[in-house]
C-alpha cells in the first residue's frame, strides 16, 4: 500500500463476532476525537458521540432491539440476525451511540452520520480495533424503551439515534470485501 492511510482504508472490515476484551480508555479517547474531527455540512456538527462500556446497558439495548425486530410484520431483518447467532451487537464490549439532530434539507444529517461513523471505523482499524457500523441499533430506540435509553445515554432534547458503531476485538480476524472494479470509471 502507498501509505498507512490507504492501508487502513483497505484493511477495514465489518466484524460480527467480538471477544469480551474492551479497548483501552486511551484508544477510545482517540477514536472519539477522530469521530468529531469528521466534516459536516455547513460545519453544523449536530451530533453527539456517546461511548458506552456498560455491559448491562448494552445488553438491554440489544434485547430491546431484537424484541422490536421480532414484532415487526416483516421478519426479514430479525431472521437475518437470528441466522447470524441472534446477537444484534455481536457481543461487542463497547458501542458508540451517535445521536443527531434533524436538519434542513431533511436527511442531510445522515451524510454527517455516515462520515462520522467511517472516521470511527478507520480510527479503530488503525489502532488494531475491530468495528461494525450498526444502523440496526436504531431499532433499540424504536420501541417502548426508546425514551428510557435516550435519557440514560443523555441525548440532548430533539436528538434522535443516527447511527451506532460496535467496537472491540474479533474472535477471528475477517477480511475486507472484494473491490468491484466495474463500479469505477475514469473519463478523460
Ligand atoms: C450505514 C451502515 C449501516 C450498517 N449497519 C449494519 C448493521 O446494522 N449490522 C451489520 O451487521 N452490519 C451493518 N453494516 C455493515 C455492512 O453490512 C458492511 O459494511 C458491508 O456488508 C460490507 O462489508 P465490509 O464492511 O466488511 O466491507 C452497516 C454499514 C453501513 C455503512
Image (cartoon, grey):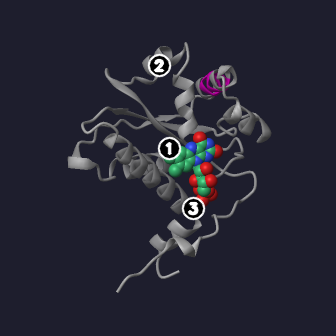
Q: Residue furthest bottom?
A: 188
Tags 3 and 2 touching, CB below 8 Å: no
Image spot of residue 19 (x, y percent)? 72, 45
Q: Which residues are magenta?
A: 59-66
Residue 12's mark?
A: 3
Marker count (numbered) = 3
For the question of whether residue 21 can be seen, the reply is: yes
Residue located beneath label 2 in the image:
152
Frontmost of labels 1 and 3 is 3
Of the pair 187 and 179, the residue shown nearer to us = 187
Measure the C-alpha gap from mark 3 to mark 2: 31 Å
Q: Please give the name of the residue rendered at 70% of the width and 23% of the height, measured from the top-left corner.
A: 70
Q: Residues within 10 Å of mark 1 (few under 14, many from 20)?
A: few
Q: Earlier in the sequence, mark 3 or mark 2?
A: 3
Residue 106's mark?
A: none
Q: Residue furthest left?
A: 42
Badge 1 marks a residue whose secondary structure is: helix
For the question of whether residue 132 can be seen, the reply is: no
Considering only vertical position in the picture, is 72 above or below 108?
Answer: above
Residue 25's mark?
A: 1
Verify whether residue 65 appears in magenta: yes
Q: Please give the name of the residue rendered at 45% of the width and 24% of the height, measured from the top-left corner.
A: 153
Amino acid at each position: 500500500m502507498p501509505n498507512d492511510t490507504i492501508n487502513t482504508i483497505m484493511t477495514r472490515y465489518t466484524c460480527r463476532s467480538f471477544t469480551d476484551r474492551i479497548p483501552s480508555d486511551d484508544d477510545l479517547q482517540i477514536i472519539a476525537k477522530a469521530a468529531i474531527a469528521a466534516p459536516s455540512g455547513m460545519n453544523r456538527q449536530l451530533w453527539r458521540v456517546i461511548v458506552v462500556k456498560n455491559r448491562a446497558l448494552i445488553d438491554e439495548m440489544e434485547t430491546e432491539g431484537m424484541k422490536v425486530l421480532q414484532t415487526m410484520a416483516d421478519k426479514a431483518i430479525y431472521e437475518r440476525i437470528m441466522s447470524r447467532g441472534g446477537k444484534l451487537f455481536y457481543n461487542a464490549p463497547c458501542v458508540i451511540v451517535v445521536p443527531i439532530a434533524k436538519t434542513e434539507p431533511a436527511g442531510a444529517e445522515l451524510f454527517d452520520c455516515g462520515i462520522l461513523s467511517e472516521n470511527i471505523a478507520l480510527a479503530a482499524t488503525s489502532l488494531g480495533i475491530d468495528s461494525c457500523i450498526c444502523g440496526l441499533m436504531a431499532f433499540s430506540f424504536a420501541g417502548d424503551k426508546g425514551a428510557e435509553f435516550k435519557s440514560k445515554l443523555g441525548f440532548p432534547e430533539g436528538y434522535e439515534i443516527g447511527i451506532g458503531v460496535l467496537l472491540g476485538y474479533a474472535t477471528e480476524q475477517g477480511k475486507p470485501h472484494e473491490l468491484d472494479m466495474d463500479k469505477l470509471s475514469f473519463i478523460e
